[in-house]
Image (spheres, grey):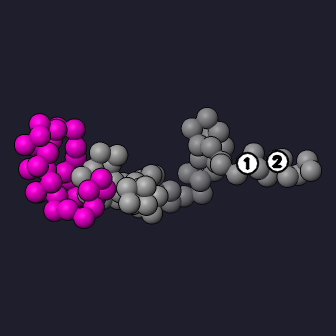
Amino acid sequence: MYKLLMKAFPNFYKGNSVYALYPFTVPKQMMQALKDLGQDSDFDDRRPFHKPLFSAQITSYHGVKKILQDHDNFHVPCEYLSSTRSRL
């Protein structure tokens, strides 16, 4: 279930989230059980939330052009595939 949640909802859960690791339990009670075992500091009990990958908004042509020309900071993931297909 953990892997399913991590793949279905990327960037929502932290790797040590009680919500993802113990999905069919009540998080407060699970944290109490972990506290009794002395392991509560290893887990995160915050509710899942979406962490956006890129939070800046680009609103001008100049901004888009600058990002597309900055190959050091912004990579195109399909660039390698398109260049190898043209060689075939």
**Residue 83: assigned label:** 2
Q: Which residues are magenta?
A: 20-48
In the rendered view, does 73 fall on the left or right side of 50? right
Residue at image position (59%, 47%) is 67
Which one is nearer the viewer's eye here, 83 or 24?
A: 24
Note whether residue 66 is visible.
Answer: no
Q: Amino acid at mark 1?
A: Glu
Q: Any magenta on residue 31?
A: yes
Quarter-of-image position of residue 26: bottom left
Q: Give residue 74's position: percent from left, percent from top.
A: 59, 43
Q: Secondary structure at mark 2?
A: helix
Which one is nearer the viewer's eye here, 43 or 68?
A: 43
In the rendered view, does 42 fall on the left or right side of 32? right
Residue at image position (34%, 46%) is 15
Q: Give residue 54's position: percent from left, percent from top.
A: 45, 52
Residue at image position (30%, 53%) is 21
Which quarter of the rendered picture does the N terminus lie within? Answer: bottom left
Q: Any magenta on residue 13?
A: no
Q: Amino acid at mark 2?
A: Ser
Q: CA distance from mark 2 to mark 1?
A: 6 Å
**Residue 69: assigned label:** none
Q: Give residue 53's position: percent from left, percent from top.
A: 45, 52
Q: Secondary structure at mark 1?
A: helix
Q: Pointer 1: what residue? A: 79
| Label 2, residues with CA under 10 Å away: few <14, some 14-19, many ≥20 | few
Note whether residue 71 is visible.
Answer: yes
Q: Are marks 2 and 1 in contact (CB under 8 Å)?
A: yes
